[in-house]
Amino acid sequence: MKFCSQCGSIVSHTIPNGDNIPRYVCNQCETIHYQNPKIITGTIPEWNDKILLCKRAIEPRHGLWTLPAGFMENSETTIEGALRESMEEAHAQLNNLSLFCVFSIPHISQVYMIYRGELIDGKARPGSETLSLDLFSEADIPWDELAFPVINETLKLYFKDKAAGRFLTHSGDIIRSNDQIIVSHY
C-alpha cells in the first residue's frame, strides 16, 4: 500500500501508538489501514454416497480438483457465501448445510470454513471458474490432483467421519514450515 484510501496521501508502514504490529498509517489524516485474513467459505456437496468436486479453470492451481469454495463477500454470512460459491462454480443448489471444518492458514492469511450439504437432485454443471466436475466416491478421489492442502485435509476428515458413521465439526491449523505442510487439529 502506498496511498491512503481516505485522503490519498502517502502512507508509512509503522507501529501505531497503542499497537504492537506494523500497519499502514496515513502520514496526513493518520488513518490506520488494517489488513486482516481473508475468509474462504465452501461446501462438500453430497449425493448418493458421493461428493462433488470441481476441476479449476482459473489460477491458482488451474486444472486441479477442489471443493466449490471461494472468498466470502462483504455483507453475506458464511453460509450465504458457501451457497453462492457452490452456485457460481458448479450451478449446484444445496440444502441442510452444517459446518464441517474451520482451518486457519496463517502463511497465506486465510481462514477456510467448509459446510457439508445435500446436493439437490444430484444436479450440477460447470460454472465459469470450473473446467469440469464430477461426483466421486472415496475410492475415486483424485488425491494426487487436489488443488490445495486444506482440501486434502478436509476430504480425509470427511471420509474418516463417514466411515465412523458420525460427522463432527473439526478445526485446526495448516502451517507451512521449511517447504513442509504441518496440520494440527483441535
Image: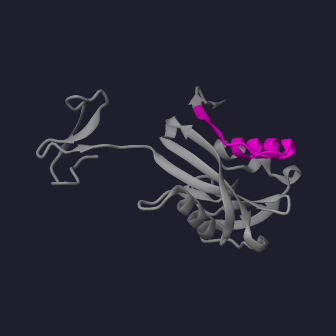
Q: Where is residue 153 in the image (x, y as percent from the top left)?
A: 70, 41
**In magenta segment, residue 49:** no
- Residue 34 location, x and y as percent? 31, 43
Q: Residue at x 80, y 51 (%)?
A: 142
Residue 12, horizontal then vertical, whole percent: 21, 38
Residue 143 vs 171, above or below: the answer is below
- Left or right, 95 with respect to 40, comes to right
Q: Which of 111 and 63 is in front in this view?
A: 111
Q: Could you tell me which residue is drawn at 23 percent across and 54 percent down? A: 5
The quadrant of the image that shows the C terminus is top right
Which quadrant of the view contains residue 154? top right
In magenta, the rendered stretch is 153-175
Nearer the observer, 90 or 143: 90
Q: Measuring 49% from the left and 58% from the top, which residue is drawn there?
A: 77
Q: Please, is residue 167 above or below residue 50 in the view?
A: above
154 relative to 1 in the view: left or right: right
Residue 24, horizontal then vertical, whole percent: 26, 40
